[in-house]
């Protein structure tokens, strides 16, 4: 989770001022009672209201709560903002925990526009605590990223002739 925290801090640091203001406004909107911290109830209520239910999983809130005090301060909420903007709210499909580090995805589902790319934490993948199509190949998230880049670079470039 520390890598995601560092990425979120760097992301926020380089945001344009209007986006930083949007992040602050989002925090204020979540903090219904104005105590400068977001309780678990405020967190879930806000995300349900915004129809962002993918983020309401308890393991995400727990991972965001770095100091374990049961609420999110602004710095912890910036990590949520980053996760929401980047689409990084990935949950293990077996044990249902937030995947903050390395995880495995089905490469065939990923590249074939499946509804899910079937992500699993290292423990569930290693211990085969899941069911999925036999014969499908799983890759860790870094390898999948490299494969995506290779596939993009290998794709033919289409030239469109506008003269005809």
Image (cartoon, rainbow, N blue to C red):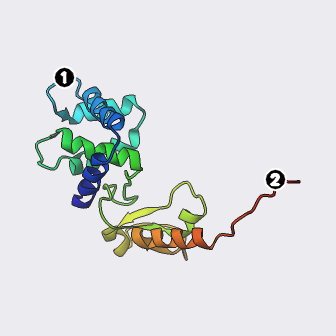
Residue at which label 2 appears: 162
108 displayed left or right of 2: right
Sooner in the amino-acid sequence: mark 1 or mark 2: 1
Image point (22%, 36%), residue name: 40
Q: For the N terminus, give its image quadrant.
A: bottom left
Tell me the element at label 2.
loop
Q: Is 85 placed above or below 106 here?
A: above
Residue 150 found in image quarter? bottom right
How far is disc 1 from disc 2 in space, using C-alphas?
59 Å
Q: Residue furthest top?
A: 33
Image point (18%, 46%), residue name: 65
Image point (19%, 43%), residue name: 75
Residue 66 drawn at (x, y percent): 16, 50
Q: Is 118 placed above or below 134 here?
A: above
Question: Observer-nearest residue: 90 or 19?
Answer: 19
Image point (23%, 51%), residue name: 63
Residue 125 drawn at (x, y percent): 37, 71
Residue 50 found in image quarter? top left
Q: Is 78 placed above or below 5 here?
A: above
Circle 2 Cα neighbour tier, 10 Å, few/some/many (<14 / 14–19 / ≥20): few
Residue at which label 1 appears: 33
Tag of residue 90: none
């Amino acid at each position: 989770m520390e890598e995601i925290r560092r990425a979120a801090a760097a992301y926020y640091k380089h945001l344009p001022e209007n986006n930083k203001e949007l992040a602050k406004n989002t925090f204020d909107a979540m903090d219904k009672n104005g105590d400068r911290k977001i309780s678990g109830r405020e967190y879930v209520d806000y995300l349900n209201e915004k129809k962002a239910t993918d983020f309401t999983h308890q393991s995400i809130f727990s991972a965001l709560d770095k100091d374990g005090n049961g609420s999110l301060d602004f710095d912890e909420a910036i990590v949520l903002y980053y996760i929401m903007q980047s689409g990084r709210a990935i949950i293990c499909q077996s044990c249902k925990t937030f995947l903050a580090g390395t995880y495995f995805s089905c490469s065939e589902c990923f590249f074939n526009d499946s509804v899910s790319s079937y992500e699993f934490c290292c423990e569930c993948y290693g211990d085969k605590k899941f069911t999925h199509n036999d014969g499908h190949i799983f890759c860790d998230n870094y390898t999948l990223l490299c494969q995506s880049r290779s596939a993009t670079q290998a794709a033919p470039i289409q030239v469109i002739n506008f003269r005809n």
